[in-house]
Amino acid sequence: MGPLLEVHQVSKAFDGLIALVDVSLAIHPGQIKGLIGPNGAGKTTLFNLIAGALMPTAGDIRFRGQSIVGLSPHRIAHLGIARTFQNVQIFPGMTVLEHVLVGLHRYAAASVLAAAVRTRGLRCTEVTLCDRALALLAKLGLAAYADTPADSLPFGLQRMVELARALATSPQLLLLDEPGAGLNPTEKVMVGQVIQKVREEGVTIFLVEHDMQMVMGLADEVAVLDHGTLLAEGPPSVVQRDPRVIAAYLGEADDVA
C-alpha cells in the first residue's frame, strides 16, 4: 500500500524568510509519525501547509495520491485530514457537547427551509448527531462534562475536547500539534494512551511534540527538521542516536536513551 500523505520537495518562504527548504517525507496508513526540531524549525509551518492554511512556495503535497495544494482548509478537512493546535482553540461559552457537534457539522446538511421549519428529517438528524457526539465523549472519558462549558475545564481536559472535536470529523489523518504542551506527567500519559487507541481504530497520526520521552514512546518513525530542512528520518531508536540530531536538538545521547 502506498503512502497516505506525501510531501514532495516542499519549500515555503515568507517575504524572503525561508521557513522550509525542499522537504520530502511520507506517512503510511496506520502510522504514528513524529515531527521534532528546535523552535523555528518549520514544524507548524509544515502542518499549516498540509491543512491548507498556507500555500507552499514550491513542491507538492498529495493525500491518497491527490494533490491538495490550493485546496481550502474545509475542503482538505472534508477529504479526511483533521488537526489540533499548539494553543488550544476553545469556543467561549460553548459546552463540551457543542464542541463535538461542531466537528460533526458536515453530517448535518439541511436546506434553509428545513432548518426554518424544523422538519422531521432535521430533528432526526439532530438526535443522531447528538448520540454520535455523546458516544465519542464516552470513548474519550469526557461524557461527564458534556454539558459543561469547555472553557471552564482544566487545561488538560480542554486538550481532550479539542481532540474529540477533531475526531468527530472522522479523519483518516490526524495532525496533532504539541498534544502534550502544558500538561502534567499524568495528563501526558492519558493523552498518549488516547493517541494509541485512536491509531488502533484506524486513524493515521502525524504529531509535533517537544517532549522527547512522549514522542519517542509513541512514534513508529520520527522526522527531524532543523532550520527548515529535513535533517533525519527513521525509527526513534535510530534518530535519537544520530549525531546530527543530537547536535541540533536532543542534547547528549544519554539524555534520550
Image (spheres, helix red, strand yellow):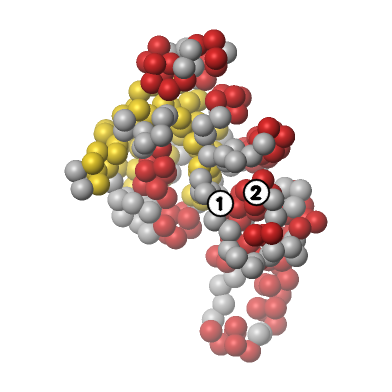
Dot 2: within a 10 Å radius of its alpha carbon, few (fewer than 14), some, or many (20 or more) residues? Answer: some
Q: Residue 67: image x %, image y %?
A: 34, 47
Q: Quadrant of residue 117?
A: bottom right
Please name the amino acid that badge 1 sits on. Val
Q: Residue 192: image x %, image y %?
A: 65, 35
Mark 1 and mark 2 lie on one chain; the one further toward the N terminus is 1
Please name the amino acid that badge 2 sits on. Phe
Nearest the camera: 125 or 147?
147
x 41%, y 26%: residue: 224
Nearest the camera: 223 or 27?
223
x 41%, y 42%: residue: 44
In the rendered structure, are the residues bearing label 1 and label 2 in contact, judged by CB atoms less than 8 Å apart?
Answer: yes
- Name the disc covering residue 88, or none: 1
Q: Quadrant of residue 110?
A: bottom right
Residue 213 position (above or below residue 96): above
Left or right? Give the position of 149 relative to 218: right
Residue 39 seen in render:
yes
- Name the disc covering residue 44, or none: none
Residue 5 position (above or below residue 214): below
- Distance in Å between CA atoms under marks 1 and 2: 8 Å
- Name the disc covering residue 155, or none: 2
Number of callouts: 2
Left or right? Give the position of 172 relative to 15: right
Q: Quadrant of residue 92?
A: bottom right
Residue 238 seen in render:
no
Quarter of the picture holding the C terminus: top right
Q: Secondary structure at mark 1?
A: loop
